[in-house]
Amino acid sequence: MPRITINKDKCKGCLLCVGVCPQGLIVADKELNARGAKPAKFKLDGKCLGCCLCAMICPDCCIEVYK
Amino acid sequence: MTGNEAIAEGAIQAGCTFYAGYPITPQNELTAYMANHMQKSGGVFIQAEAELAAINMVFGAAAAGARAMTSSSSPGISLKQEGISYIAGAELPAVIANVMRGGPGLGNIAPAQSDYFQATRSGGHGDYHCLVLAPASVQESYDLTCLAFTLADKYRSPAIILSDGLLGQMMEPLLVRKEGKIELPAKPWALTGCTGRQANVVKSFYLKEGDLEKLNLKLQKKYKEIQQKEQRWEEFFLTDAKVALVAYGTMARIARSAVKVLREKGKKVGLLRPLTLWPFPKKAFTMPKKKYLVIEMSYGQMLEDVQLALCGKAGVEFLGRSGGGIPSEQEIIVKVNKIYHGKNI
Amino acid sequence: MEKIYSHPRSLRDLSTHYCPGCGHGLAHRLIAEVVDELGIRERVIAIAPVGCAVIAYDYWDFDCSEAAHGRALAVATGIKRVRPQNIVFTYQGDGDLAAIGTTETIHAANRGENVTVFFINNAVYGMTGGQMAPTTLLNQKTSTTPEGRNAQFQGYPLKISEMLALLPGVKYVERVALDSPQDIIKAKKAIKKALVNQMEGVGFSLVEMLSPCPTYWGLSPKASLDWIKNTMVKEFPLGVIK
């Protein structure tokens, strides 16, 4: 089942990935990361298609996609 | 061959493979010579859209490991100052020829020496120096250009050939040394594509705290070494001289003939001719003469270096004209006689 | 389970200094991806501008220089002419390329230098605090056009890419946008074409990327992308210009 990993502390919380995920599987984490930003968080329960749109829009290469 | 062309031939002989220039009198023969010969010797010639672009092209070619050069005359050299500062900051070897003309502003195309400060005090921003070499003949224009490339590579620093309109246009015989292919020093730091090594970066930007200071200390160490090792000057009838003339480039030629005339009249006069204007030949002033007469086609720029070198240990007089005016032999003789018959000689 | 999308080899795995949602990060990554795919990491020489991307050489893992503000294309000319076997590209902002560096840009293009130009158009000067750039839109507020750019005093957004396309020395000009995954895919194609052009000696190639600058547009990263899609592309239409 495809999934993604998000580098929690490298993420700057721009949340562009949230808007592009066709399955709405990414949300803003409530906890702050090391940078003091609210990083993106991947909801494991949904059906990730491995489409990589989130990884493409991420300006900081925080997302890796597994399929 | 003209002085300008001799500079160009010297550069090609020294293995220069990139030249970017822009039209400006009185150095056009240099650019034209490069246009004719650079390609034939396997190098690159570009007429840039401005002197400012030309110096930045030289930055690029030097960053890529080539021996690179540009040339211009006073106003054009002012346009290049920012680029020269970047070349010094990025520790790149490059040669810049300035065939000086009357200033300030558009000035005119007559010869002058009023860019001395700009050349020796680093005309751009930041604490840096360029090596400054001052030819006084067509042969020297050739020889010192070859030397400039050697020193520029040795110290990874910009080097300036400080000629002037008269020297540039003058024709004299030239002994060209055909030593065959010059063996160029290795440049591991150059941008050549990071095959088999870490990526190289050529830059002068140091944002992290302390890094820029580290670079500056490195540059200062280099400049001290240059000052110790690379001072060059020539002496003419100086050993027993009571009045020493100090002049460089075209001015030295006129001063030399004045010395001959004065010597014939039994006057103990000599000439001290700096070849390197930076590092200024302070060593030549360690056993000071009685009196010095500095002669320049400016209103007293090298004068200050002579005064600094002497620190008051000897009297220093000055004779200078600029804006195209050139102190004549006769004026020098009159001035020397006045000094000679001064009180304490 | 195999990793199908990850961090390009030519991009160092560092956290960049760019603001959240800044387009530079995207452009850096796309260029690094294409350099990897073309296998030219060891032949590339990049020239970073003066601007937000001045320390691009910290992020790219290949040979890089840094030019005085506006002079990148003169430096590129010097490098490419003495090392034609290398792949030379400049990475410049709108101020660097179309304000202070206009002369160097037009003449390098007119000489048809066989180099590639990546032109990041974010309509402001980012590094120095969001001043007006040549490409600032009319009525767009910046720190030097507090009431919005007014044509009467500050003239019009400069279409440098269209201008350059007129020059015979220029072989390929395309404007893309970093405002959505779909457009990013197109941008990557354009980057690849521009670099392949150079590899094949086609000549001067330029890719203009409309890039978000949330901080100085005063918008959220998401809203910045929308601003590009809805407003900026009207002034700077996307597509192949030449």
Image: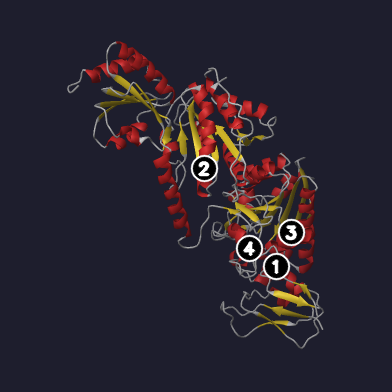
Instruction: State the CA–CA distance, disc 4 to disc 1.
Output: 24 Å
In the rendered view, does B110 fall on the left or right side of A17? left
Circle 2 is placed at which residue position? B154
Residue C205 vs B138, above or below: the answer is below
Mark 2 vs mark 3: give the one in front: 2
Q: Closer to the N terminus: mark 4 or mark 1?
A: 4
Category of crowding for the residue at label 3, using alpha-carbon neighbours closer than 10 angstroms: few (below 14), some (14–19), many (at least 20): many
Percent x, y for residue C66? 59, 52
Percent x, y for residue C65? 61, 52
Q: Examine the rendering and report whether any part of residue C50 can be seen.
A: yes
Q: Amino acid at mark 3?
A: Val
Q: Amino acid at mark 1?
A: Leu
Q: Chain of mark 1?
A: C
Circle 1 is placed at which residue position? C225
Mark 3 vs mark 1: give the one in front: 3
Category of crowding for the residue at label 1, using alpha-carbon neighbours closer than 10 angstroms: few (below 14), some (14–19), many (at least 20): many
Instruction: State the CA–CA distance, disc 2 to disc 1.
Output: 51 Å
Q: Amino acid at mark 2?
A: Lys
Q: Amino acid at mark 4?
A: Tyr
Category of crowding for the residue at label 2, using alpha-carbon neighbours closer than 10 angstroms: few (below 14), some (14–19), many (at least 20): few
